[in-house]
Image: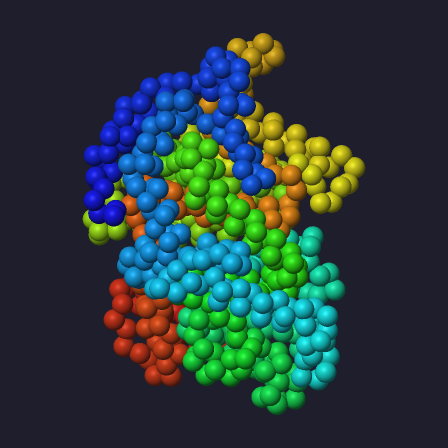
Amino acid sequence: MTTALLPLSKRAAWKALRSHARRVKALHLRDLFAKDPKRGDRLTVEAVGLTLDYSKNRVTDETMKLLVSLAKESGLRPRINAMFQGKKINVTEKRAVLHVALRAPQGTSIVVDGKNVVPEVHAVLDRMAAFSNRVRNGGWKGHTGKRIRNVVNIGIGGSDLGPVMAYEALRHYSERSMTFRFVSNVDGTDFAEAVRELDAAETLFIVSSKTFTTLETLTNAESARAWCLERLGGDPKAVARHFVAVSTNAGKVAAFGIDTANMFGFWDWVGGRYSMTSAIGLSTMLAIGPENFRSMLDGFHAMDEHFRTAPFEKNLPVLMGLLAVWYSDFFDAQTVAVLPYEQYLKRFPAYLQQLAMESNGKHVTLDGTRVQADTSPIYWGEPGTNGQHSFYQLIHQGTRLIPCDFIAFLETLNPLGSHHDILMANVFAQTEALAFGKTRDEVKAEGTPDGLVPHRVFEGNRPSNTILAERLTPASLGALVALYEHSVFTQGTVWGVDSFDQWGVELGKVLAQRIIPELEAREEPVLAHDSSTNAMIRRYRNAKKRRT
Ligand code: G6Q
């Protein structure tokens, strides 16, 4: 399908966008708004409880028309269909890409290799729910008969960032009598601090690893087992009461010593960074309960359906994806700032970094030829208002163009005096200041001394999206995450890259495996790296020697 597409630079819409961009660069948002008093309403779309105001972007109606044409010429519609039909669109790994099946309601059908996978998805969800209920109501006991009060998820990358983001985001809905921790880094500090004041008799470890071969996760899991056994009398039977696994690899789970009866499975068509709605979400379900987890899945599903069926002109993920392409490829913007005005979303930018950058940080297209444009922008961000007191300076007055996504909720989960009014006023003020700025004349009219005028000018014309939802709920979180998943898919489709592989993480892993024995060998190893790497290895070994 995709191979029949014209190369990016040959697509009519792409060529038209090139010359169109030159004209748009000369326009200022001040004028676009002045000439069109309804622009704010016109360039706002709503779906699945989310409102996207994209009016403060440097676009005209013509831009949006051309971007939508670009999506069409890039085969977005057939590619969406291919994904939802379980086609193997992850071509380099020959896999279907079906995170959308993880949230499909019971009774629906999504077929992979001739088999409807939805019943299996629900069978795992049911097992997760039964297990979560047992743990939450104290029915599941630890080795010494105590109930579980602490849950530690051990996993990294896609097996960590989704769970930790969702736990933080939905903390309001979580079982407050339980403690949830997340260990990902192989740096021993992560594990040591996570379990520091926990009672092993009350602690359950979830070892989350799709492959169950990941060095960091297995190292942490081994340390967790040793920590647990040391505190519970050394009886290996304790492992069955304190360890469960989430994986696709039953053999490795059993080899580690976890009873496969306590394993929750998923499938090779779930990519790591798209796995938070699979059994990888077990810690989330333990925290918020099966019903809330189901409403989170329903939020995802509603956005999946919107993405699958809505016309591109009104399709939130498509619009956001196309706008990211617009700035990345026609304005040379290097980054997108994601600015949630919601403290519970503090890990959302980190989650999004993996989602976007691991998916579309690619230099070749599906057929292996060099991609003809810049691919994924760098996603970054921090919750507002904190960022306003640090890096926003550069966004307002620096020399780089930083498109921003503001995310906010109309109602707070923690009403406290006028906090929420102040918070929301800041969201609206920031988007206004970025778009309209402050002219030289306005600065002068305030009586600013001449020498200071240039320093106090805000050029404006700095683009932003604003995403608003009623409240942060499991369902609205689901819709928000799915919005970005499909925005990333849209971007990857335009660039024609495989958004579902991640070969770029392999080389460092292989090299680390070579260096570990060189750090641990008793005898001085023969080092055959470059002079920099050799010297660092020697320095480390010498420091180790000095300590012993
Ligand atoms: C995600 C990546 C990667 C993966 C981790 C953990 O898309 O594949 O971040 O999730 O490397 O892998 P395991 O779950 O297999 O331990």
Q: Quadrant of residue 308?
A: top left
Q: Residue at x 51, y 45 (%)?
A: 303
Query: What residue appears at the point 37 percent right and 81 percent down from the top-left corner?
Result: 521
Q: Nearer the viewer, residue 394 or 57?
A: 57
Q: Is residue 21 above or below residue 197?
A: above
Q: Percent position (x, y) of residue 472?
A: 64, 45
331, 48: nearer the viewer: 48
Q: Is residue 97 above or below residue 150?
A: above
* Residue 267 quadrant: bottom left
Residue 122 in the image, given as x and y percentages of width and height: 53, 64
Left or right side of 468 for 93: left
Left or right placement of residue 14 versus residue 271 in this view:
left
Q: Nearer the viewer, residue 84 or 205?
A: 84
Q: Position of residue 95 (x, y in %)?
A: 33, 61
As drawn, 510 above or below 231 = above
* Residue at point 38%, 83% (across, down): 522
